[in-house]
Image: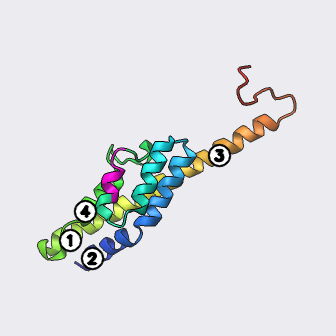
């Protein structure tokens, strides 16, 4: 029960940080202004369930886990109260929540890393002597 309560608190307390990182990924992957506005509105929402509902369809695809929005999965994992679940169910949920948080953190890190590496690679190619690859140049 303690692990479930702990992870539930972690998810609730780190919601804004998770949202900030999701917004960073969306910005770096050139998500549209509507997507960014929706993500920001969800970030500013005080109720976790409402923020999850707002972004259910706008989370970057690279952050989805088996096609699911990870925040929806996390919300589903923490939405039941401690006293409604057995000790075994609490432990099972805590383990699942830990796996989801780890996977989401890895996906965020990978998305940001890939973007950084791509930008650095492009910069190296463009700065190369005799390089023709300017923005908008079809050659």
Q: Earlier in the sequence, mark 2 or mark 3?
A: 2
| Separation (CA) of disc 4 from disc 2 | 11 Å
| Separation (CA) of disc 4 from disc 3 | 34 Å
Q: Which mark is residue 90?
A: 1
Q: Earlier in the sequence, mark 2 or mark 1?
A: 2
Residue 132, image quadrant: top right
| Separation (CA) of disc 2 from disc 3 | 38 Å
Image location of residue 35, percent across then percent down = 45, 45
Q: Which residue is identified by label 3?
A: 117
Specify whether residue 63 is painted magenta: no
Image location of residue 57, percent across then percent down = 35, 44
| Proximity of marks 2 and 1: CB atoms separated by less than 8 Å | yes
Residue appearing at x 26%, y 73% in the figure: 4
Q: Is 139 displayed left or right of 28 in the figure?
A: right
Q: Which residue is identified by label 2?
A: 5
Q: Earlier in the sequence, mark 4 or mark 2?
A: 2
Packing grade of label 1 (10 A; few <14, some 14-19, many >=20) is many
| Proximity of marks 2 and 3: CB atoms separated by less than 8 Å | no
Residue appearing at x 35%, y 54% in the figure: 70
Residue 125, image quadrant: top right
Q: Which residue is identified by label 4?
A: 77
For discs 1 and 4, the disc positioned in front in the rendered view: 4
Q: Nearer the viewer, residue 105 or 9?
A: 9
Residue appearing at x 33%, y 48% in the figure: 56
Q: Earlier in the sequence, mark 4 or mark 3?
A: 4
Q: Secondary structure at mark 2?
A: helix
| Separation (CA) of disc 1 from disc 3 | 40 Å
Q: Earlier in the sequence, mark 1 or mark 3?
A: 1
| Separation (CA) of disc 2 from disc 1 | 8 Å
């Amino acid at each position: 029960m303690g692990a479930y309560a702990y992870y539930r608190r972690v998810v609730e307390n780190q919601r804004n940080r998770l949202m900030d990182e999701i917004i960073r990924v969306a910005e770096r992957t050139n998500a549209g202004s509507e997507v960014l506005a929706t993500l920001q509105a969800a970030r500013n929402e005080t109720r976790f369930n409402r923020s999850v509902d707002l972004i259910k369809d706008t989370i970057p695809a690279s952050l989805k886990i088996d096609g699911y929005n990870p925040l929806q999965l996390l919300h589903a994992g923490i939405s039941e109260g401690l006293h409604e679940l057995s000790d075994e169910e609490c432990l099972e949920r805590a383990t699942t929540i830990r796996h989801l948080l780890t996977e989401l953190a890895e996906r965020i890190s990978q998305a940001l890393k890939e973007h950084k590496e791509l930008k650095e690679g492009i910069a190296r190619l463009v700065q190369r002597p005799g390089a023709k690859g300017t923005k908008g140049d079809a050659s």
